[in-house]
Image (cartoon, coloured by chain):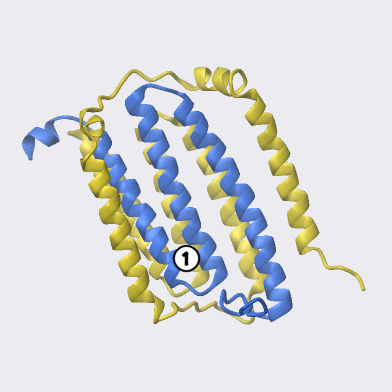
Amino acid sequence: MSEIMSQPPGLTAYLLLAAMLFCIGLYGVISRKNSIAILLSIELMANAVNINLAAFARFSGNLLSQGFALFSIALTVAEVVIGLAIVILLYRSHKSIDAEAPTALRG
Amino acid sequence: MMSWIAFTVIAGVILTAALQVVQSEDLVRTVFWLALTLIGTASLFVHLDAEFLAAVQVLLYTGGVITLMLFGIMLTRRGAGVRIEHGSKDKPKALACGIALFGAIVYSIYSDKQTANAQISDMAGTEELGQLVLGDLVLPFELLSLLLLAAMVGAIALARKVDP
């Protein structure tokens, strides 16, 4: 253990942290019923990806990876904007933001 | 050693806040737990020598997304306090999915030799990142601004009240 502690955290530590964050987000997406809470969990998953990209940039010395993380952050913001617009539409038509409320397309 | 302490503290904050985001029963509190997660991620970016990413993270996520989420909650809630519940039958399924995916990711991390041997390498700063984004990546960058414009117009078109 002391050998590991004597040097700075390696790539594996960051990847494990991101994996945990991603799986927590996945748990939230599947178990939540409120659609805003689902959007928040998707944010968690996107964050895990950004941590991975930043860690890869640090351990490869290649800035392209940080550029990717920048684009990914901006894309997530666009996704949140559209997602919230859809939630507001959902609220207007169903008076609820429960993800199980809209059943018109159910076969 | 200092690096490990910083990493452990930041990771602890991020994971605790993330667990609260998927567990907490109050929607507004959930949003603030998410804000804590995002700030923790920003400090992890600083820890990884990605200062510009940290600044963008704080500006866009913690500034923009959290505000948007609060607006969304205010526009869609009825009465004071928003309780959110889990679909109780989905909880074990979700837990199983999460653990299975985590196992798969851990397996693939440890089966890759390159990951274990990766060394910290010299890192170019924000100046080089700017050169890259406005040099090699200038076309995707402009497309990104187009996408943001489209998302903005789309959100307004979706959410505005249509007069009959």
Q: Position of residue B113 (x, y in %)?
A: 21, 32
Q: Which chain hosts label 1?
A: B
In the rendered view, would you say B56 is above or below B17? above
Q: Position of residue A36 (x, y in %)?
A: 56, 66
In the rendered view, would you say B163 is above or below B121? below
Q: Tell me what hue chain A is rendered in.
A: blue
Question: Quadrant of the rendered structure where residue B122 is?
Answer: top left
Q: Is residue B158 left or right of residue A5?
A: right
Q: Residue furthest right?
A: B164
Q: Tell me what hue chain B is rendered in.
A: yellow
Tell me if mark 1 has few (under 14), some (14-19) or many (20+) residues whose alpha carbon lies within 10 angstroms of its own.
Answer: many
Q: Residue furthest left?
A: A2
Is disc 1 placed on a helix, strand or loop? helix
Residue found at x 61% / y 75%: A97
Q: Can you say which quadrant of the picture contains the N terminus of chain B?
A: top left
Q: Position of residue B18 (x, y in %)?
A: 38, 58
Q: Position of residue B139 (x, y in %)?
A: 66, 26
Q: Can you say which quadrant of the picture contains the C terminus of chain B?
A: bottom right
Question: Quadrant of the rendered structure where residue B138 is?
Answer: top right
Residue found at x 33% / y 55%: B15
Give the tally of numbered discs.
Answer: 1
In the rendered view, would you say B92 is above or below B48? below
Residue found at x 42% / y 65%: A28
Q: Nearer the viewer, residue A30 or B133?
A: A30
Question: The residue under label 1 is which amino acid type?
Answer: Thr
In the rendered view, would you say B34 is above or below B2? below
Q: Which residue is mark 1?
A: B30
Residue found at x 59% / y 60%: B69
